[in-house]
Structures are given as C-alpha cells and as structure tokens.
Image: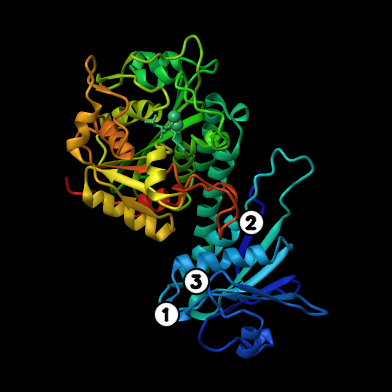
Amino acid sequence: MANNVTVESVRSIPKTVEVIGVPVGTTGAVPRQLGLSRAALTAHGFDGKVGQTLTVPSSSGPTVIAVGIGDPRKATAATVRRSAAALARAASRRASVATTLVDSVSLDARSAAQAAVEGFVLASYRYTDLKSGVENPAVTLSLVATGSRAKGCDAGVERGRTTSAAAWTARDLANTPPAYLTARMLADRAVAMAKESGLEVEVFDNDKLAVMGCGGLLGVNRGSTEPARMVKLTYSPAGATGHLVMVGKGITYDSGGISLKPSDASHANMKMDMSGAAAVLSAMSALKALRCRTKVTGYLMCTDNRPSGSAVAMGDVLTFRNGKTAEIHNTDAEGRLVLADGLSLGVETKPDAMVDIATLTGACMAALGTKIAGVLGTNDAFIDQVKNSAGRADEPVWQLPLERDYRRLLDSNVADMRNIGGPYAGAITAALFLAEFTGDVPWAHLDIAGPMSVDGDDGWLSRGATGFGTRLLIDLALNFTKPKR
Ligand code: BES
Ligand code: MN
Ligand code: ZN
C-alpha cells in the first residue's frame, strides 16, 4: 500500500487545518492556544506525559488536541517520536493535522523533526492491500517551526520522510502473505526499488547459485516448488569513506521443512521470516536520498522453506559458498544456512565490516522478548556502532556473548558442523554457526525474531510487521566508520 501520509515543514499553522496538536509538557507553561489551565488539564486526567493526548472539544474551527511531551527539558528523539505517534492516533486519520515542533534544549531541531515525522507516519501505517474496499485515507501533517529552528525542521522533515517511507515499505513486504511474495516476486520488487532509488542490482537464479556453490540457499530451496533468488544490491557513492556489507534472511515462508512446525497460531507469522531481507532492501533504498557516504553491498537470501519429496533430509550434508560443510539435524534451522552463503560472498568483497539481520531464533525471543533484538559479533567497536544506531532509531538491541566454548555444541561426526546446537543458548549457537562464514571481517549479527511483529498498536508500531531494523541500518550506514580489527 502506498505511503499516503504527506509531511511538510512550515512556518505557521495552515488556515484550513482540521486538527491542531499542541505540545504540552509535564512542567512549564501550558500554551495559551489550548485555552485551558494546568489545573483543568489535570482534572481531565492529562498531565503531559509522553503518549498521553487530550482532545479538546470545540463547536467551530479545528479540533485541538493536547499532546503530552514529558519533561520538555529532557526531550529525546524517542519521546518526540512517541508523542507524534500519539497525535496521529488521536487525530484518527483526519485529512490535515498541524503541530508545533517540540522545542527543547536537549534536542536539535533536525533530530526532533525527523523523529516527529517517523512517529506520525509509522503510527498511521496499516496493511490494507487485501481488505476489500479499505484504503488508508490520505493525511497531511504540517510541522511548524520558526526562527532558528526552521532550517533544521526542513532538513529533519526531509530525512524523516525518507526513513519512515523505508520502514513503511519493509512492513508492507513482511505483511505480504507467502503466495503474494515468493522469492521471485521479492527479487522483482528489489529490482524495481533499486531502479527507483539509484542502486545497482543483480539477481541470481538457481542455476547461477549452483555455479557459485551456494549450497545453503539451494539446500533450503530443495523442498520448494518455487525457485530461490539471491539479490545483490550495491550502493557505491563517489569517494566512499568505507564499505559495509549487509546480509538479510529472506525466507518468504518458513514451514520448518521436514522438521515441520506445529499448526500453532504464531506460525501464521512465518510469512514474516523475510523481515531481515526487507530491512536491508528498504534501508538501502534510502541511502542515495540521504547522501550516504558509505559504500554498501547488500545480499538478500530468498526462498521459502517447505517439506516435500525433494526437501533436504535429516542427516544430509550441505556445502556452502566458502567450502565448509554442515550436517542437517533440523531443517527448521534454515536461516543460518542461507545466511552462510551470503556472509561468505560478503567476505569475498573485502568490506570494512559486515552486518546480518535475521528472524533467526525463538531462543532469542525467549531471552529478550518482543521489544529487543539480540546482537552478537566478533568486533566490539563495530557492535558499539550498531548499539548507537539502535539507540538513535529507538530499535533496541541487547548484546549476547559469542561464547566460543559453545562451539563444540555444533560438532558433527561427518561434517564441519551440525546446523543446530543443544537445548540451551540457541541464539548463541546460531551466531557461532554464522561466525564460521565471516572470515576476519568485523561482523555483527542482529537476531530480530522477537521484534519482527507486534500483536496490537503500540506507539509508532502498528499491529503486524514492525519493519524493525530498517531505520537502524540506515543510521548505521550513515554514521559508519571503519572499526579497528
Ligand atoms: N524463523 C524461525 C525463528 C523464529 C521463531 C522467528 C519465531 C520469529 C518468531 C527460525 O527459522 C527457526 O525456526 N528457528 C528454530 C531453530 C531451532 C530449530 C534450532 C527455533 O528457533 O526454534
Ligand atoms: Mn525455521
Ligand atoms: Zn526461519
């Protein structure tokens, strides 16, 4: 579904606007625009906390909504993003909304504006493609800033449009059902997006993948009636200051394969098992518009994972692009098999760092829940860059240890390794498997199984796929510096 939220940066509230959002802090003066005292607001249960809104009825003119922004001296991108999301939900899709950019000593105008756009746009997201007669109504947000904050607001709105549109696209891709987004269709979408956004793109089919020795992706694909696709995306700005590789898990549907998943309700979400690939593709589509100075190479590893007569069997051994072999002990641990080929190819380009992003393990979700992604890797300086980007994007990550002593849990009698470890530390053993394909390139792995989706609307998250990682990866590319090895 097309992103139908328009945002403009303006100097005053447009005359014909339907809704005016008025930022109100927990302390400080209440803007006169509201026509209400602090005591009156409190009496109505509104004390200015982030996420709170109070709609003030009026018999004529625009609807005025008080929008809580918390302690105005301590505003952050995260609080502004959440406040703007609350405004979007309270304004409930009225066609035109205006609000003043939050003014705080703790936050520059550009970051505030970017966050406000992200919060408003992403809270307005709905996946409506397959609902008959339902379409997202068009909404315009006018963000008002004056004086010294006007220029920053212009720039922040511009950025916010790009980052939120990318996350919107990632959500659309992940929400799309399996038969509407096969590996071939995902590759077609990638080609179209690459052309629109100034990326080089190359698509590899099964024949090419066989010549290249990508036995992991082809092994997972063996049970499917649909062919696999690998998509290589390149963003190569003149005078690049570094080179980052991004690898995304693109399992368009994960049935588990021969190790079939039970028909549990949560498994309907396995259409979202390509969320990592969606994040890489969408993030990369924003780089040129944001004038990113880092060269970025992306690999989308796309197939579905199905059981059939031709499916990879338990005990089968696969050979990956880098020559290593793995004995299959569970066909549901397929993500690491497709990523292995992608990481191997990434190493061959001799990048300064690699990041992969994948809905990889239920174990990571058990450890960190649905709000926080796991991050593991081989280089703490690079992992710190990932953590900083996660903080700025408000896409939280928590580092888990890459405990080398657990590598023995992957030992196999017949191959270099097995594709699963024991019953414990599943997120770590999965990462240790991936580490086998990263050579000596500084590497970070994001396990987004938990935060890939939400059950209900929550701030700027709208029910369904979250697009988690898209804005994190954009920030990472924009701020990337070569980590010391
Ligand atoms: N795609 C799943 C992981 C997943 C689970 C993502 C829940 C999002 C929500 C992955 O391919 C998988 O099946 N992992 C297995 C690994 C196990 C067999 C070692 C898991 O976590 O159970
Ligand atoms: Mn699986
Ligand atoms: Zn999977």
Q: Residue reaching furthest front?
A: 423
| Residue 1, x across and y down, in percent | 66, 43
- Under circle 3, the secondary element is helix
Q: Earlier in the sequence, mark 1 or mark 2?
A: 1
Name the residue beneath numbered marker 1.
Answer: 105
Bin the neighbour count of mark 3 within 10 Å (Cα to Cα): few under 14, some 14-19, many 20 and up: some
Whole-number angstrom distance, CA of label 1 to CA of label 2: 28 Å
On the image, which quarter does residue 376 sit in?
A: top left
Residue 235 showing in the rendered view: no
Looking at the image, which residue is at 58% across and 63% down? 85
| Residue 400, x across and y down, in percent | 28, 47
The reply to whether callout 3 and callout 1 are in contact (CB within 8 Å) is no
Left or right: 477 in relation to 229: left
- Residue 151: which numbered mark, if any? 3
Q: Residue reaching furthest top?
A: 309
Q: Amino acid at mark 3?
A: Lys
